[in-house]
């Protein structure tokens, strides 16, 4: 009976899916449900949790530091989208071109930064954008007769350092995503376009970009999440979670400050739930705008 049950064709699909379902329930649904529950409580280590209703959320609405963190994360996310979507796409098209030589070398070179530890990368970029004598960026500015800039002490210049780090680390990853999308486009389309006299720009705008839409939507989706969830890069760039006037504070950084540094776990859980809601709203909006929810005719 047991053997017949295990070898049943009706049962087999559920057996194969079961490991994923268990992992999903244990490592995603349960932590999420626990976090939502904690967000309605006052939770501190060593003390019994107290149910306080929506007090944590009401406190968030008047928390200027929280809104500063949200603004920082949102601006960082937008800047990374502006840079890490079009440029990797163009680089991928160039690397995939038949006229490109050494394409494997360029793919490896662009991807190599992603293999570097974010701790190491953040430390290197902190030294590059630092104020010490001989720091790389200010030395380059000095060659052009410009005065040194305190990059990590200003809001706009701080964004420059953060986005530079993100660009260095993730350009190669996005290039590989777009290269995989380009491989799915048949060469026949380009050959037919060449016969019709289409220019390279027309091929790119009329063939490449439309057929890369699924890949582009995927890259945008994960980039939105990565931008809003950024934390370690900021912490390493400012050598801690306390940047001048919170210019480098992110939503996750604020969650860490409240939950770990201040032992206010209930309030930190509320921050995490709001972060999840913001991420879901933005991603669902961009998916709806891109037509991913429309039924194919």
Image (cartoon, helix red, strand yellow):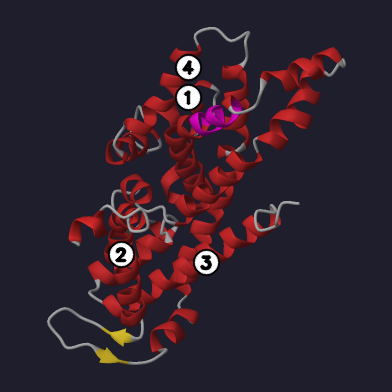
Residue depicted at x 40% and y 89%: 55
Q: Is residue 213 above or below residue 275?
A: above
Residue 281 drawn above or below residue 137: below
Q: Is residue 151 left or right of residue 27?
A: right
Which-is-in-front pick, marks 1 and 4? 4
Q: Position of residue 220 (x, y in %)?
A: 57, 47
Q: Residues within 10 Å of mark 4 (few under 14, many from 20)?
A: some
Of callouts 3 and 1, the N-terminal one: 1
Q: CA distance from mark 2 to mark 3?
A: 18 Å
First of labels 2, 3 by sequence position: 2
For the N terminus, give its image quadrant. Answer: bottom left
Residue under numbered circle 2: 256
Residue positioned 45% across, 77% down in the render: 63
Q: Quadrant of residue 244?
A: bottom left
Q: Residue at x 30, y 69 (%)?
A: 31
Q: Mark number for residue 140?
A: 1
Residue holding disc 4: 106
Q: Nearer the viewer, residue 71 or 173?
A: 173
Reading the chain from its start, which is encountered first: label 1 or label 4? 4
């Amino acid at each position: 009976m047991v053997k017949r049950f295990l070898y049943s064709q009706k049962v087999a699909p559920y057996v194969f899916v079961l490991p994923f379902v268990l992992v999903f329930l244990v490592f995603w649904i349960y932590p999420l449900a626990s976090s939502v529950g904690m967000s309605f409580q006052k939770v501190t280590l060593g003390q019994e949790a107290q149910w306080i209703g929506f007090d944590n959320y009401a406190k968030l609405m008047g928390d200027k530091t929280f809104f500063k963190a949200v603004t920082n994360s949102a601006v960082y996310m937008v800047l990374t989208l502006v840079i890490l979507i079009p440029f990797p796409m163009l680089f991928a098209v160039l690397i995939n071109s038949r006229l490109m030589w050494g394409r494997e070398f360029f793919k490896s070179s662009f991807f190599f930064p992603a293999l570097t530890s974010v701790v190491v990368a953040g430390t290197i970029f902190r030294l590059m954008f630092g104020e010490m004598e001989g720091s790389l960026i200010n030395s380059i500015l000095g060659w052009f007769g410009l005065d040194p800039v305190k990059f990590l002490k200003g809001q706009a210049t701080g964004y420059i350092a953060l986005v530079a780090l993100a660009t260095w680390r993730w350009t190669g990853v996005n290039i590989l995503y777009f290269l995989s999308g380009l491989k799915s486009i048949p060469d026949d389309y380009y050959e037919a376009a060449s016969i019709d006299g289409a220019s390279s720009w027309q091929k790119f705008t009329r063939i490449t970009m439309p057929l890369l839409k699924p890949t582009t939507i995927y890259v945008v989706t994960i980039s939105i999440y990565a931008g809003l969830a950024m934390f370690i890069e900021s912490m390493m760039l400012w050598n801690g979670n306390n940047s001048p006037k919170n210019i480098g504070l992110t939503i996750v950084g604020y969650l860490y400050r409240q939950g770990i540094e201040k032992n206010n776990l209930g309030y930190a859980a509320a921050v995490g739930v709001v972060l999840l809601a913001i991420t879901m709203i933005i991603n669902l909006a961009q998916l709806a705008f891109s037509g991913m929810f429309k039924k194919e005719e």
